[in-house]
Amino acid sequence: MPKFRLAMLGLAGLVLAGCGSVHPGAAATIDGVRIPLDDVDEIARVYCLASATQGAGSSLAGVDMIGLRRQSVADLMAGELADRIAEERGYEIELPSIPAADRDQLAEMFGDDIDAAMELIRRNQRTTQIAIEMGREAEPDVEDENQLVQIGQQQLAESIADRDVSVDPRFGLDETLQQVGDTGSLSVAGLSLDATAVEDRPAALQCTA
């Protein structure tokens, strides 16, 4: 796995959500900007393939698509919010380049999904860089970038209260940004999954190639 995998998966601790109605076909909205369900599914597939690579070989069995969809919503919401803050505060964000060898490895890993994977990596890199700038602004004496990312992510999470945010309740997140249900199904309604093993869930809720 390329060394910058954490740039792609590094927002796992940041979950932004809210309550209320959402536009048809949207997983969530931020200040009226839709997060399409199709985008969520596309990113979840990238995470699915990355999870398979991180785990046992190329096997996708037992990878929980529910959690991957939830994480995809979180990343898209975090990215949209971060972009708005960067524009409002006048941040100039420069992303690190991805070496050719790493791009080749990504192409081998993701195959036909390489464009979606690259878009996700760049989006999450940008969100991370914005979090660093927010961290510097909040704590100018801190120099360690890992600390700055954590500070900035906390700033992002707190700033959600100032936005008009809604999330589809099927993702199992409440207005306090906490997970309240093991749902995440966009096609199997009313199904209780708490005691169901991942490999025994419907195909729509499993990670498949």
Image (spheres, helix red, strand yellow):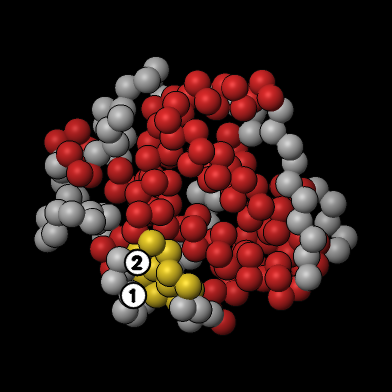
Quadrant of the rendered image containing residue 157: bottom right
For the C terminus, give its image quadrant: top left
Vertical order, 69 against 109 (above or below): below
Count neighbours of disc 1 (C-alpha within 10 A) and say few if under 14, some if 14 to 19, many if 20 or more: some
Q: Which mark is residue 84?
A: none
Count neighbours of disc 2 (C-alpha within 10 A) and say few if under 14, some if 14 to 19, many if 20 or more: some
Q: Of residues 202 and 98, which is closer to you in this image?
A: 98
* Residue drawn where x is 57% and y is 22% of the image: 105
Q: Which mark is residue 22?
A: 1
Q: Amino acid at mark 1?
A: Val
Vertical order, 193 against 164 (above or below): above
* Residue drawn where x is 85% and y is 52% of the image: 143
Residue 14 in the image, given as x and y percentages of width and height: 53, 57
Quadrant of the rendered image containing residue 37: bottom left
Q: Mark 1 and mark 2 in contact (Cβ < 8 Å)?
A: yes
For the N terminus, give its image quadrant: top right
Residue 84 in the image, given as x and y percentages of width and height: 63, 71
Q: Can residue 182 be seen at all in this image of the molecule? A: yes
Residue 172 in the image, given as x and y percentages of width and height: 30, 62
* Residue drawn where x is 79% and y is 61% of the image: 92
Q: Amino acid at mark 2?
A: Ala
Q: Can residue 10 be seen at all in this image of the molecule? A: no
Secondary structure beneath dot 2 equals strand
Residue 66 in the image, given as x and y percentages of width and height: 29, 48
Secondary structure beneath dot 1 equals loop
Q: Of residues 40 and 150, which is closer to you in this image?
A: 40
Q: Which mark is residue 26?
A: 2
Cα gap from disc 2 to disc 1, whole angstroms: 6 Å
Q: Hey, which residue is sitting farthest right in the picture?
A: 141
Judge from the rendering whether residue 37 lies leftward or rightward of residue 154; answer left or right.
left
* Residue drawn where x is 46% and y is 78% of the image: 32
